[in-house]
């Protein structure tokens, strides 16, 4: 009788432990996603769509609460917030933490980008080719990049390189170096601060893609844009997940998320281009004027920014990175 009781008790304990273990592995992962884009911006809508798709395709195994507009964490602190777990997932601009991502920084150089699709392909090609250790403390989801960044001004129509001299231009990361190389005075502030600075005349202009004229309403406070495509830069954005949270997601759901990421790389790139078209239309509707550069003038701009490439290669060399190799790879990829 005593043996039977002991056996029953042992069986009950084993059953309880098994059930507990099963319930722990079956428990859904509930994650947070921090993004600085306003809710109406196409890139914010896509981020929210990604969150919803993760929940749907994993059948609720992974659910994500989306925080837009910097409500969970501000843009410059987003990457560190993902590392520490303050945010489980985050999207932000790499250039907001200048020098933190030396390999990926090359993507932002003024290489003459023509579209968001092209820039996004380049960004992911660099990520896959060089597997930069600068992302080692997170699980990379994917990267994407906007279409050609152009010079916009409040009052002065830029017709030649000399017109930029002394103008205060909002710019960040490599775009600030481009502004400086062309004779302007860079003012390194985030996109969220741009509207008020331009509206109040704190800055004379901004370098940003056409989409920002509508996506951030900058078309209301800038009235001129110069088609400076020979020095068109891009800005790389990253989407990362906290490593510990990633490790707790089931292998099946991880595989689903990685497949989903490939779809959204394409979506983000295409969205940058469609929003560039919408931004240009909005800019024109506000009375904005467009100036084109002659081939000769474009060549002057391209020559003026060459030191930006040299300085990049010299700077990252101190970190053991062959910057010229990264630049050459990007140029080859762009072709």
Image (cartoon, rainbow, N blue to C red):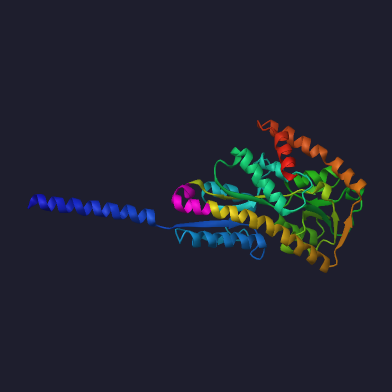
Q: Main secondary structure of the magenta part?
A: helix
| Residue at the outermost bottom position | 285
Pick the front one: 122 or 71: 122
The residue drawn where x is 59% and y is 52% is 262
Chain part drawn in magenta: 244-257
- Which quadrant would residue 276 be assigned to in this image? bottom right
Q: Position of residue 60 (x, y in %)?
A: 45, 61
The residue drawn where x is 73% and y is 38% is 327
Residue 14 visible here: yes
Q: Position of residue 207 (x, y in %)?
A: 79, 53
Q: Position of residue 271 (x, y in %)?
A: 68, 59
- Which quadrant would residue 181 be assigned to in this image? top right
Q: Is 128 within the magenta?
A: no
- Apparent side of residue 125 relative to residue 30 in the rendered image (left or right): right
168 vs 285: above or below = above
The residue drawn where x is 71% and y is 56% is 191
261 vs 56: above or below = above
- Which quadrant would residue 105 be assigned to in this image? top right
* The C terminus - image quarter: top right
How many numbered badges does the structure rendering display?
0
The residue drawn where x is 72% and y is 57% is 193
Residue 87 visible here: no
Pick the front one: 274 or 172: 274
| Residue at the outermost front position | 335
Q: Position of residue 304 (x, y in %)?
A: 86, 41
């Amino acid at each position: 009788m005593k043996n039977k009781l002991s056996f029953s008790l042992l069986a009950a304990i084993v059953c309880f432990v098994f059930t507990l273990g099963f319930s722990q592995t079956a428990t859904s992962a509930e994650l947070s996603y921090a993004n600085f884009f306003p809710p109406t911006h196409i890139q914010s809508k896509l981020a929210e769509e990604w969150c919803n798709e993760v929940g749907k395709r994993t059948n609720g195994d992974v659910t994500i609460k989306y925080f837009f507009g910097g409500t969970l964490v501000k843009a410059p602190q987003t990457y560190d917030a993902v590392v520490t777990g303050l945010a489980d997932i985050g999207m932000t601009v790499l250039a907001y933490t200048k020098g933190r991502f030396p390999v990926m920084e090359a993507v932002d150089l003024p290489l003459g980008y023509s579209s968001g699709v092209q820039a996004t392909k380049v960004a992911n090609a660099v990520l896959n080719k060089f597997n930069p250790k600068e992302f080692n403390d997170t699980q990379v989801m994917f990267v994407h990049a906007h279409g050609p960044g152009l010079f916009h001004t409040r009052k002065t129509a830029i017709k030649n390189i000399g017109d930029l001299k002394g103008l205060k231009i909002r710019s960040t990361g490599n775009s600030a170096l481009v502004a400086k190389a062309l004779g302007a005075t860079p003012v390194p502030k985030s996109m969220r601060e741009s509207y008020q600075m331009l509206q109040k005349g704190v800055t004379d202009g901004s370098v940003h893609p056409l989409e920002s004229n509508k996506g951030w309403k900058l078309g209301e406070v800038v009235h001129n844009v110069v088609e400076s495509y020979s020095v068109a830069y891009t800005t790389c954005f990253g989407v990362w997940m906290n490593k510990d949270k990633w490790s707790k997601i089931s292998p099946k759901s991880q595989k689903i998320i990685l497949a989903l990421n490939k779809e959204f790389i394409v979506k983000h790139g295409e969205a940058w281009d469609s929003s560039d078209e919408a931004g240009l239309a909005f800019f024109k509707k506000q009375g904005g004027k467009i100036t084109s550069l002659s081939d000769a003038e474009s060549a002057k701009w391209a020559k003026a920014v060459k030191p930006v490439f040299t300085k990049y290669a010299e700077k990252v060399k101190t970190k053991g990175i062959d910057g010229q190799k990264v630049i050459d790879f990007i140029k080859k990829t762009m072709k």
